[in-house]
Image (cartoon, rainbow, N blue to C red):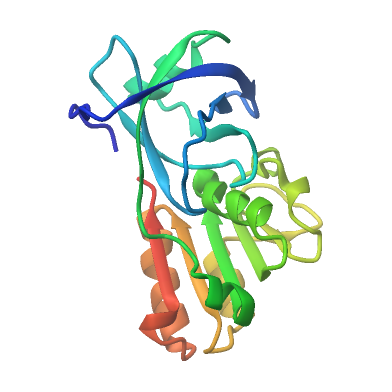
Amino acid sequence: METATASRHSTTHTVQSVRDLTDSTYVLRMDRHNMSFSPGQYISLGVNDDINMREYSVYSGVDQDFLEVIVKEVDNGHVSKLLRRLKPGQSVRLDGPFGFFTIDPETRQNADFLFVATGTGISPFHCFALSYPELRYTLLHGVRTSEECYDNDVFPADRYTPCISRESSAHFNGRVTEYIRQNPVKPETKCYLCGNCDMIYEAFDILTDQGVPAENLFAEVYF
């Protein structure tokens, strides 16, 4: 969500690259400057001469020496358009990190996880996979077409299931919520949901009906 409240504690980071994934989606890489964050947190980004900022989950891993976010350029997205035009060597303004969509060390070691994403909501799970390769997880990624399976080679094939709604494929054809209906989840599973609010509300209802308690459900809404 774009804001006009630049923090007095903003830091400046140098752009390393802008890597296109599709016609509308790209990965922005910048210098990390030793910034500490927990996987699952987000940062707020803006261009130095513009007051508007936008929140993005960290896409890169906690042990990488650069910082990445995945961005979808939208028609009315002021910041997403500005960020895409940046060139290596230019700078961005950064606030953060923020947020509690994280996993504590004891849970990482002992729990089984279901990760459910739509679109660029894959970002925190990409960070989880890079940062915590020992995690026991299944990842469902709801996309319209197979070209939106962004950087899916990061995930082991037996842990990643794309749910493709607008083209036929060898994967699951349909929405992530339909996959969950057809493949019930064990109540003790820790379920992390990230994406559009409609998916999250529907998935919450399905999972609670399957017996997953509220304390095992975690959500980050992407508008």
Dividing the picture into quarters, in which one does residue 159 lie? bottom right
> Is residue 177 or residue 136 the one in the foreground?
136
At 52% from the left and 68% from the top, the residue drawn is 177
State the count of labels. Answer: 0
Picture residue at 39% right of the left edge, 39% below the top: 43
Q: Is residue 11 above or below residue 194?
A: above
Location of the C terminus (image quadrant): top left
In percent of width and height, residue 161 lies at 71, 61
**What residue is drawn where x is 46% and y is 86%?**
212
**Does residue 92 appear left or right of residue 169 in this picture?**
left
**Residue positioned 35% across, 53% down in the render:** 99
Coordinates of residue 103 in the picture (x, y in percent): 50, 67
Q: Nearer the viewer, residue 54 or 197?
A: 54
Residue 149 location (% of width, % of height): 68, 45
Query: Left or right: where does residue 122 sit relative to residue 7?
Result: right
Q: Is residue 150 left or right of residue 107?
A: right
**In front: 195, or 218?**
218
Q: Is residue 24 visible?
A: no
The N terminus, quarter of image:
top left
Residue 114 picture quarter: bottom right
Q: Is residue 106 something that shows in the picture? A: yes
Can you say whether 115 is above or below 127 in the image?
below
Q: Position of residue 48 (x, y in %)?
A: 33, 13
